[in-house]
Amino acid sequence: MGDWLADNGLLVGLALLDGISSAALIFLVAVGLTLVFGVLRVLNVAHGSLYAIGAYAAASAGIFAASRGLPAWASLPAIVLSAALVGAVLGPLIEKLLLRRVYGQDPVLQLLVTFALFMILEDVQKLIWGVQPVHNDAAVRLLGTVDVPFGGDAIPFTAYQLFLLPGVAVAVLIGLTVFLRRTLTGRVIVAVTEDREAATAIGIDSARVYLLTFTFGAALAALGGALSSPTAALVPGVGASTIVLSFAVVATAGLGQIEGAAIAALLIGLGRSVAVYFAPEFEVVVPYIIMVAVLLVRPQGLFGVAVTRRV
């Protein structure tokens, strides 16, 4: 074991760093998905399209800023503003015009409706941005690389992926936890999550809570996409792969579990990254192997609570 680690130390270090960076992005999308499900009780397949649109919008904003001669640091606020704009525009639009019509309906109908929206938004992306790769790595180049000591060696890694991505994910996790548990609005959202009928009976405007929650969830998906845009070229289908991974995280953690989503994202991100370096043929299936293994032992997920069904 010691000889193997000595020979593959750099690969192990890279796998860990890549896994943490990947987990941060997956978490941002998955936590929005699980938040929306916890309140609205809708598994939104179109969540992946919001991720992709956020990524394309951030890349386009960065390219536009560069074409106007703005400094490289302008790409960082462009990422945040793009995500906020996507969430603020598409979130209320989708919730008011579409999702409100399927609340309380058959879950199969909800899935079909959100899947149809996903397909429409995929075509909209192709109409706006085409099918050629779109890439803007100004933020990555701006922050440069750092040497990470590991096993007596130094691993060069981008500061953007090492510090910014995990930092934002941790900030979102802490901020969302504090918001839901310490603020009045957050407690109202939790009340609707626990018992929407009782919450409505005491005067809580559940329609407003649904709108706010979905908009926030959409902004989180767009933020994940915007943050991913400097790290890879964007091509059609990026939203589909991300939503599948996010579903794996949500199912592994348990539906509606925010803190659990962070742990599940880290588990799946590290597992997938290790597979990339040591067993590439299993890269695609490792997240789902982890998910299935967990669900076989705990059908409600790692942190989910079994619910008694009324007959």
Image (spheres, rainbow, N blue to C red):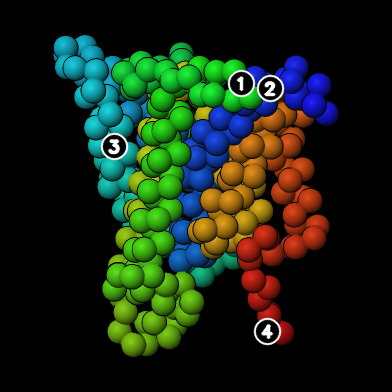
Mark identifier at residue 310: 4
Amino acid marked by disc 2:
Gly
Mark identifier at residue 80: 3
| Mark 1 element type | loop
In percent of the image, x 80 and y 22: which residue is there? Answer: 4
Mark identifier at residue 9: 2
Q: Is residue 73 left or right of residue 120?
A: left
Q: Is residue 300 left or right of residue 197?
A: right
Mark 2 or mark 3, whichever is nearer to me: 2
For label 4, the crowd category at 10 Å Cα-Cα, with few meaning under 14, some 14 to 19 and many 20 or more, is few
Residue 283 placement: quadrant: top right
Q: Are marks 3 and 4 in contact (CB under 8 Å)?
A: no
For label 1, the crowd category at 10 Å Cα-Cα, with few meaning under 14, some 14 to 19 and many 20 or more, is few
Marks 1 and 4, Cα distance to the nearest angstrom?
59 Å
Question: Does residue 278 lie above or below 210 as drawn?
Answer: above
Q: Are marks 2 and 1 in contact (CB under 8 Å)?
A: yes
| Mark 4 element type | loop
In percent of the image, x 25 and y 37: which residue is there? Answer: 81
Mark identifier at residue 216: none
Marks 2 and 1, Cα distance to the nearest angstrom?
9 Å
Mark 3 or mark 4, whichever is nearer to me: 3
Amino acid marked by disc 4:
Arg
Q: Are marks 3 and 1 in contact (CB under 8 Å)?
A: no
| Mark 3 or 4, nearer chain start | 3
| Mark 3 or 1, nearer chain start | 3
Q: Are marks 1 and 4 in contact (CB under 8 Å)?
A: no
Mark identifier at residue 152: 1
Mark 2 or mark 1, whichever is nearer to me: 1
